[in-house]
Amino acid sequence: MNDSNHNLFEVVNNISGKTEEVKIDRLPEGTKITISVTALVNGTVEGDKVTIVNYTAPGPISNLYLTTKANSLKASWSPPPGNVSSFTIKLNLEGKTEKIIQDQRETNQYFDGLKTAANYTVIVYSVSGHLYGPPVESSKFTLPLPPTNARVASSTKTQLTFKWTAPENIQTAKYSVKLESKFWKHNLSFEVDNVTNYTFRNLTSGTKYNFEVKTVTDDQTSEAAMTSCNTEPDKREISLSMLCSSSEPLLCVNNNIKEGVFQEVCQSPRGQNKYRAWELRTRFIKLFNDTVFWKLEKQESENA
């Protein structure tokens, strides 16, 4: 019997040194076939009947479709024409067979307890008797779970190192790491494999950076784990002067008045001159907020 060209069987009888061969083709796929052969003498006298039962090979399944969650996968398909007795399903991961399901009568199969963000391949065979149809396969990643516990490992003036915890039950991890500075409008993005830390270099000192890390596959991305950190400041002084004028004699040289104005500028403004002080402080907050390092301090006069 030859599955590929649909020869069901061969009957060979030695009669007068000749070989009798019967070839039966164009039989339906995946079908149980019963054939009986009877010898005739002079076209009328029958010998004993010989009966043979066999199957034609089934065709391939179609419409194999995979749906995945973080730790599970469901495969569904359409059966081939003809009568199929069952299906055999293989689940492979990175070229290795993880599970084999035999004698499946339904046109779907559910797998659970799988690894997250892993590329699984499902192979389905139709079965008719002892014959297998051609394999049909499809691959899909399980959904990625997010990393957790994003945190700062170290910081300097020009670099930041971040760490995170890998999701549970992951096979081969790939991550997308991003770093953003709102003040400088810097955006850095990289992909890393099988590591749980990353160092960003050539950064700007005294700057707040927002960090996020996601688990990624070829076509899926998890939610992000996020944190933020400031590079160490490279402090530089900028002097600001305020001119005081008043109709009240000697008011501007009064130390209590000068100290009050300074407190209103550098802290929460209140009392006399609070509106001008608040305007100056609000200006700094609007420009910098917490995106870069800045601090208002009183500079003591050299003549004090």
Image: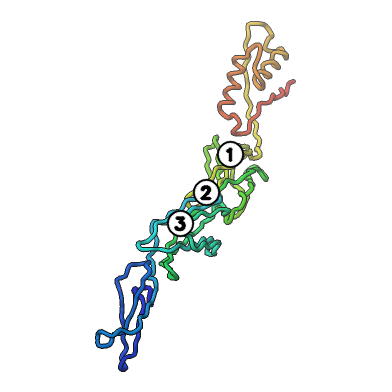
Instruction: Give 180 or 204, whichever is nearer the viewer.
Output: 180
Give the side of residue 250 with respect to residue 73, left or right. right
On the question of residue 197 being in view, the answer is no
Mark 1 or mark 3: whose residue is earlier in sequence:
3
The mark lying in front, picked from 2 and 3, is 3
Q: Residue at x 31, y 76 (%)?
A: 24
Q: Residues within 10 Å of mark 3 (few under 14, many from 20)?
A: few
Q: What is the CA distance from the residue labelled 2 to the residue labelled 1?
A: 29 Å
Q: Which residue is mark 3?
A: 106
Q: Which residue is mark 2?
A: 69
Using the image, tell me which numbered label, if any, was put on residue 210.
1
Q: What is the CA distance from the residue labelled 2 to the residue labelled 3?
A: 21 Å
Label 3: which secondary element: loop
Amino acid type of the residue that numbered disc 1 sits on in the rendered structure: Asn
Instruction: Give 42 or 301, whichever is nearer the viewer.
Output: 42
Q: How many marks?
A: 3
Mark 2 or mark 3: whose residue is earlier in sequence:
2
Amino acid type of the residue that numbered disc 2 sits on in the rendered structure: Lys
Label 2: which secondary element: loop
Q: Residue at x 68, y 26 (%)?
A: 297
